[in-house]
């Protein structure tokens, strides 16, 4: 885990090199909200830059919620939170920057070292509870506290991504009837679609700590709908937990939110059980053992060497206010430029007149006589504007070639790329299949076009009309990549032996739709109850 190549992955061709003045040094990972990169402040402090996914960035409701949560999160100052130092909800794309925490997530640490000791769990719960105190004090509810959102530094845990889950709530990205959050760590009221409150985070705190103590979720594994059913309709099995921890877990996991412990009570309860170690500051030794060797962070990316000598004054990334003012000035600059162009065209028109008046200047069809070539064909492009930013470079090059051949380019604009349709939680098992035409409509039994099953040896995806292809290598599949690879695809069956959580599968439907399915959970150990869960993005008519 502490191998630098495991933590800091090189940038890919689709990754930006700079985000709002922050030069990106490596890729850290990706999640439901977007991709995360390593960068540095001008003073050399490592930061994590999270760039929002395009399908979220295009949603005005998301921008509004994201901006509100950013403003609240920037006020959070806690010893056990990763400080949000910069952000822009109106950027293209939106992004945020937090101080980089050099350590594994709780999920990674448990996967590598196994369950934590009782002492370590007490320190963990105290740290997470103190983080929740700072978060709740600013009116924020985390809503998605889980092992992957708790980073383990050498001096204790850091809670990250607080409040960001709310930004996606109600957008097209989550408008498929699913509740925001991670099923295995939700509280009963959250799983039932009720309003999340600070007590909801306390329930998630206990579930996260139970994962640390057991090495697995307290309410078991399996399809999210089954886990949520157990959370809502049955109490936790506290006998699975170490005996000294059971009283605190019983309080935090109470079905009635009003009966749960407060974060302050959790901190006090843990300190009492830690006794002298709490007063002597014994936590660092515990966290150094859990987090492992110190992570060596790559150095900042140097600025490119200028071709000409530059002033000695250092350049700093523009502030958020400066970026806003720059965006406000852009339309004005464009308007002035367009007005100047119009005046220039008018002047040229006057120069082109032969003095016989406007009647002779235009032919009966309404086109300018001066624009007519020797053969009577118009030598000017009939396109409304040659600077239309929506036209692709290929279309521009094609138009230039046609003019060189003495023909006029087509008057219809170049086609736009289809917009992605995100479906963040798609479930496939022996009873549920999916139709690309409408993934929200649950296809009972085997009636859907895309089916999952484990017929004999191994599990697979199968379809009568759709074509499958699994992407290999680094994550980050795109429409262009799927379109190119599926162009001559013929496989209506895809064995899943080589697929895992995070694997990406391209799909081409019979109507020319192209989809990218990213596996979030693959459970095939027991074929009778096997299932596949993940996020589906569809581009209509993109083939």
Image: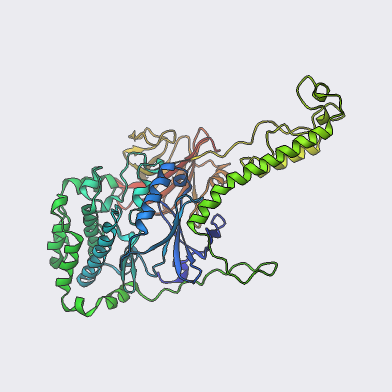
* Residue 248: % across, % down: 14, 62
Of 297 and 340, nearer the camera is: 340
Q: Quick one: which residue is furthest to the top in this view?
A: 364
- The residue located at (52%, 56%) in the rendering is 322
Q: Quadrant of residue 348?
A: top right
Residue 505 shows in the view = yes
Instruction: Tell me if 394 is positioned left or right of 154 in this view.
Output: right
Q: Quadrant of the C terminus?
A: top right
Of 188 and 488, nearer the camera is: 188
* Residue 397: % across, % down: 72, 42
- The residue located at (55%, 60%) in the rendering is 18
Q: Quick one: which residue is furthest to the bottom in this view?
A: 280
Vertical order, 246 against 142 (above or below): below
- The residue located at (56%, 60%) in the rendering is 17
Q: What colouring style does the render use?
A: rainbow
* Residue 7: % across, % down: 44, 66
* Residue 237: % across, % down: 15, 56
Q: Quadrant of the N terminus?
A: bottom left
């Amino acid at each position: 885990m502490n191998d630098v190549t495991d933590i800091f992955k090189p940038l890919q061709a689709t990754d930006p090199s700079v985000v709002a003045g922050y030069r990106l040094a490596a890729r850290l990972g990706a999640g439901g909200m977007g991709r995360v990169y390593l960068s540095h402040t001008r003073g050399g402090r490592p930061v994590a830059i999270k760039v929002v996914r395009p399908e979220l960035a295009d949603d005005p409701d998301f921008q509004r919620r994201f901006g509100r949560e950013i403003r609240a999160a920037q006020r959070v100052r806690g010893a056990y939170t990763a400080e949000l130092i910069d952000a822009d909800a109106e950027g293209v794309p939106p992004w945020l920057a937090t101080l980089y925490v050099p350590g594994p997530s709780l999920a990674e640490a448990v996967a590598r070292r196994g369950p934590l000791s009782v002492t370590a769990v007490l320190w963990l719960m105290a740290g997470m509870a103190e983080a929740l105190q700072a978060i709740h004090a600013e009116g924020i509810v985390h809503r998605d506290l889980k092992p992957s959102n708790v980073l383990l530094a050498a001096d204790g845990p850091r809670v990250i991504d607080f409040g960001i889950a709310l930004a996606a709530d109600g957008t097209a990205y989550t408008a498929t009837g699913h509740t925001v959050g991670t099923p295995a760590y939700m509280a009963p009221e959250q799983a039932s679609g009720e309003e999340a409150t600070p007590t909801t985070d306390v329930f998630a705190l206990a579930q996260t700590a139970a994962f640390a103590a057991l090495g697995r979720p307290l309410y078991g594994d399996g399809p999210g709908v089954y886990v949520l059913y157990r959370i809502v309709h049955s109490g936790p099995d506290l006998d699975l937990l170490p005996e000294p921890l059971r009283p605190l877990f019983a309080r935090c996991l109470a079905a009635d939110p009003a009966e749960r412990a407060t974060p302050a009570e959790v901190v006090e309860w843990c300190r009492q059980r830690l006794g002298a170690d709490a007063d002597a500051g014994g936590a660092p030794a515990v966290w150094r053992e859990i987090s492992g060797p110190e992570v060596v962070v790559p150095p900042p990316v140097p600025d490119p060497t200028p071709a000409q000598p530059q002033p000695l004054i250092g350049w700093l990334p523009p502030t958020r206010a400066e970026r806003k003012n720059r965006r406000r000035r852009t339309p004005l600059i464009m308007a002035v430029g367009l007005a100047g162009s119009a005046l220039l065209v008018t002047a040229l028109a006057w120069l082109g007149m032969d003095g016989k008046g406007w009647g002779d200047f235009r032919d009966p069809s309404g086109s300018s006589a001066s624009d007519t070539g020797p053969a009577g064909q118009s030598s000017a492009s009939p396109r409304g504007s040659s600077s239309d930013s929506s036209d692709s470079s290929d279309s521009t090059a094609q138009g230039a070639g046609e003019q060189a051949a003495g023909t006029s380019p087509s008057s219809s604009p170049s086609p736009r790329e289809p917009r992605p349709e995100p479906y963040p939680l798609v479930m496939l098992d022996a009873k549920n299949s999916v139709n690309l035409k409408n993934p929200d409509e649950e296809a009972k039994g085997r009636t859907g076009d895309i089916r999952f099953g484990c017929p004999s040896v191994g599990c697979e995806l199968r379809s009568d009309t759709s074509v499958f292809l699994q992407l290999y290598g680094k994550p980050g599949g795109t429409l262009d990549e799927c379109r190119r690879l599926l162009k001559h695809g013929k496989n209506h069956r895809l064995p899943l032996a080589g697929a895992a959580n995070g694997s990406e599968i391209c799909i081409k439907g019979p109507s020319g739709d192209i989809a990218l399915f990213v596996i979030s959970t693959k459970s095939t150990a027991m074929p009778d109850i096997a299932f596949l869960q993940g996020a589906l993005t569809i581009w209509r008519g993109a083939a």
